[in-house]
Image (cartoon, helix red, strand yellow):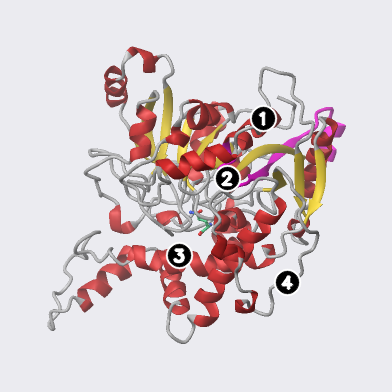
Amino acid sequence: GLGLRQNAPPIQQQQRRLLNHFISKVPVEAQQQQQQQQDGSVAARRFTLAVKDNIATASPSTTTCASPFLTTYQSPFEATIITQLRARGAVLVGKTNLDEFGMGCHSIHSAFGPVSHNRGSDGVERSAGGSSGGSAVAVAEGDADVALGTDTGGSVRLPAAYTGVVGFKPSYGMLSRHGVVPYANSLDTVGLLAREVGPIKDLVIGDGLWAEHDPKDPTSLSAAARRRCAKDREGYGVPQQEEALSLNGIRFGIPLEYNIEELDPRIRDAWAAAAKLLQGLGARIVPVSLPSTRQALSTYYVIAPAEALSNLAKYDGIRYGSRREGSTEDSDGDGGVLYAANRGRGFGEEVKRRILLGSYTLSSEAMDNYFLKAQAVRRLVRRDFDRVFRLENPLVHEAELSFDLSDLPDSVAMENKFGPTEVDFLLCPTAPTLAPRLEDVLSQTSAVDAYMNDVFTVPASLAGLPAISIPMPVVASSGAAAAAAGGAEEDTAGLQLIGQLWDDARLLSVADALS
Ligand code: GLN
């Protein structure tokens, strides 16, 4: 490593608070049973795995999505990704806490109570990020070597940034989502968290997870498309860990639109320091413009709730979810009263807010101004990325390239700022601030304040691109006093690297070398 990564010192056992990061744990005997079932070749590579509780594990373990609706739900089958990881040595240790159905930024909207962590230099309870906060804390605390999360708009990367671990969101369509409870189908991905990049890279690239098409997941890229994508990437060297690291010839783009006013100055400084470090290693740092970035956040919060709305329709307390006790069968027999009573009680506040948002933006008066405009801006976001990357997007169709600009809302910046810049990766922060205090986010009244945390993660989600958050050190606010006392106190923030579609292998290699 090159010293970019510097975790807060491990928390002493006695200082450890109730972090509430697991919803259920696999009993030790059952863990041993899992080990016995693994053959010798796998046993040598055994690792512990924590799984976000919106990813199906077979009964007797529960899959609750942290929803009041599903607190006792047992899935009849296991998600493909878990089967794949078991075959590679995973031993499941537990299911982790999250924002209900993956909707949230701080892992506080849970039927099981909020997740917290206290890895900052001041030991104060902080937001673990969301929605995969439980998974991030599980790896940060050493309760699991690797954890699975889901990343729809940043839910793996944001918790990684807030807790000082690594969080990887793969290209859309790469890892199977069969058995992953859907939130927004056009955005959902399964991501991995670990304390280092190495284990993630080994599993996804080394052990060939990236190549496996799953016929049970309609969004899993076909074998033929995978071959085509891989072929496009031939001849692009990946720096090997064994060799002395040289980033000669690798270009990193700094998206200027990410330098927002709300960015914590300590993160801005750390971002600049990371760029300088890369430069020292032979990389070229170039400014790039992604003009649609500013619209990406609102676009995401139109598209994601609209898709969520249809995914959540099945939770009626009749087919799925728990039924309200003592609820009256309705007299007209259409299920309306029962349905409303079950859903009124079965969903948490944030999920209800998303349902209302989605219902509004899809309603006949609002559809043209919201949902359709959002689809148009989404294409622009993707086009912004395709312009700056050296590699072509292997899945872009002609039709998308000749997209009609007159569809766009007036507020969208249209000028093509810098022309083709041809970078390999984009370098930016994962979130605009350090992990906020848990107390503050619990008392926060505005949902939009929470949504702001996603401003740097949603663009890659809208474009389906691979992205990773690795820890970068920042000087803590109490740093001056600490430095005077002889020890520089440091917290971590997340440094985000974004790659072109299906450039996951190179992205992981570069991240591995940097962390
Ligand atoms: N915070 C975002 C949301 O609430 C992202 C969630 C996610 O990626 N699952 O929608």
Q: Residue at x 15, y 78 (%)?
A: 330
Q: Nearer the viewer, mark 4 or mark 3?
A: 4
Circles 4 and 2: CB atoms closer than 8 Å? no
Residue 384 visible in the shown view: yes
In the orientation shown, which residue stands out farthest toward the bottom? Answer: 365
Of the numbered discs 3 and 2, the one sitting upstream in the chain is 3
Question: Label 3: which residue?
Answer: 350
Q: Which residue is mark 1?
A: 237
Question: Disc 1, ligand 1: is the CB inside 8 Å?
Answer: no
Q: Earlier in the sequence, mark 2 or mark 1?
A: 1
> How far separated are the C-alphas under marks 3 and 2?
27 Å
Question: Please, what secondary structure does the residue beneath circle 2 have?
Answer: loop
- Residue 24's place in the image compared with 91, above or below, is below
SS under mark 1: loop
What is the three-letter code of the residue carrying label 1?
Gly
Q: Residue at x 76, y 47 (%)?
A: 253
User: Which callout, 4 or 3, points at the residue further toward the start of the chain?
Assistant: 3
Residue 99 x/y as whole percent: 45, 54
Q: Amino acid at mark 4?
A: Ala
Q: Which residue is mark 4?
A: 413
Q: Earlier in the sequence, mark 1 or mark 4?
A: 1
Q: Dot 4 lies on which element?
A: loop
